[in-house]
């Protein structure tokens, strides 16, 4: 068993649970705490001793057993069964540049920009990136059933990406607004590949939007 401290860079909705993910303070490597394959962390699994939920930019300490990769989610680590996550301190937004990734693209650009087909997922060696976006624009639309949907549009390495937002705080806040487009300006974005396929593809998701000097996880 090993103690690790990670900067929380995602607390994203995931089929009723949450996907917690961040970067190891010591190595800079991505870590996604899990307690079983293919599932997020329940409230009981992820909450702090005081009952609060991990927030973006919390420096979280946890006890881990072994690396626990699951298909393309290579960043998974198995939490100790009796472990409880603790918040040690806050990480400063201005230091995120030291953690940012710089892949040439976000899992390919030659097909549908918001997904990776089943037959190509094996080529994906990672499922998480933290990137800097100069101007994130949120598009709030209304589906046929009346439910609102929030998607984010940004440019990365001259390619336009429009992806679904699974950051629960951002999503809930903007679903309360009228339909339309909202510019967030400069921010850091955690992008992720979904754990499970949908319609023969793994979708690319905006798992977190981290705004300057704002604790968006609260």
Image: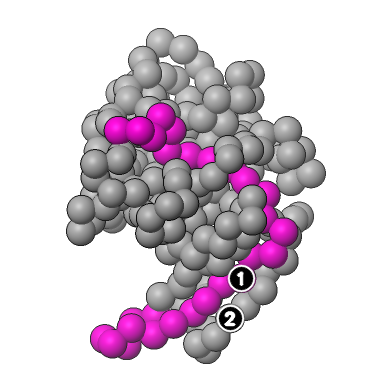
Q: Residue at x 48, y 39 (%)?
A: 128
- Element type at mark 2: strand
- Residue extent of the magenta highlight: 122-148
Check if residue 161 falls in the magenta segment. no
Residue drawn at (51%, 30%), measured in percent from left and top? 30
Q: Nearer the viewer, residue 126 or 59?
A: 126
Q: Is residue 151 or residue 80 the one in the foreground? A: 151
Q: Residue 126 in the image: x percent, y percent?
A: 43, 33
Q: Please, is residue 174 above or below residue 155 in the view?
A: below
Which residue bears the numbered disc 2? 181
Q: Residues at badges 1 and 2 in contact (C-beta under 8 Å)?
A: yes
- Residue at label 1? 137
Above or below — where is 94 with respect to 187? above
From where the camera sits, is residue 169 visible?
A: no
Residue 16 relative to residue 204: left or right: left
Does residue 116 appear in this view? yes
Whether 131 is among the magenta residues is yes
Q: Nearer the viewer, residue 158 or 13?
A: 158
- Give the position of the N terminus as an image quadrant: top left
First in residue order: circle 1 vs circle 2 = 1
Q: What's the mark number on residue 71?
A: none
Left or right: 135, with 167 as reference point: right
Mark 2 Cα within 10 Å, few/some/many (few <14, many 20+)?
some
Q: Quadrant of the C terminus?
A: bottom right
Q: In the figure, 63 relative to 190: above or below?
A: above
Q: Position of residue 85 (x, y in %)?
A: 47, 32
- Please state which of residues 114 and 47 is positioned toward the viewer in this rendering: 114
Compared to residue 105, the image places residue 13 above or below, namely below
Determine which quarter of the picture holds residue 69: top left
Q: How many marks?
A: 2
């Amino acid at each position: 068993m090993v103690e690790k401290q990670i900067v929380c860079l995602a607390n994203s909705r995931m089929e009723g649970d949450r996907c917690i993910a961040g970067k190891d303070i010591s190595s800079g490597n991505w870590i996604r705490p899990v307690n079983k394959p293919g599932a997020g962390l329940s409230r009981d699994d992820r909450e702090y001793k005081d009952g609060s939920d991990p927030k973006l930019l919390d420096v979280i300490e946890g006890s881990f057993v072994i690396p626990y990769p699951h298909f393309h989610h290579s960043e998974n680590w198995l939490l100790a069964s009796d472990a409880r996550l603790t918040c040690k301190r806050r990480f400063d937004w201005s230091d995120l540049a030291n953690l940012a990734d710089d892949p040439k693209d976000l899992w390919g650009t030659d097909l549908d920009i918001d997904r990776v087909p089943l037959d190509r997922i094996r080529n994906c060696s990672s499922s998480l990136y933290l990137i800097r976006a100069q101007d994130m624009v949120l598009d709030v639309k209304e589906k046929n059933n009346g439910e609102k949907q929030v998607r984010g549009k940004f440019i990365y390495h001259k390619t336009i990406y429009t992806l679904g937002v699974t950051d629960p705080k951002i999503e809930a806040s903007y679903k309360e607004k009228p339909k339309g487009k909202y510019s967030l300006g400069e921010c850091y974005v955690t992008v992720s590949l979904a754990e499970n396929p949908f319609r023969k593809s793994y979708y690319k998701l905006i798992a977190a939007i981290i705004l300057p000097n704002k604790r968006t996880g609260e």
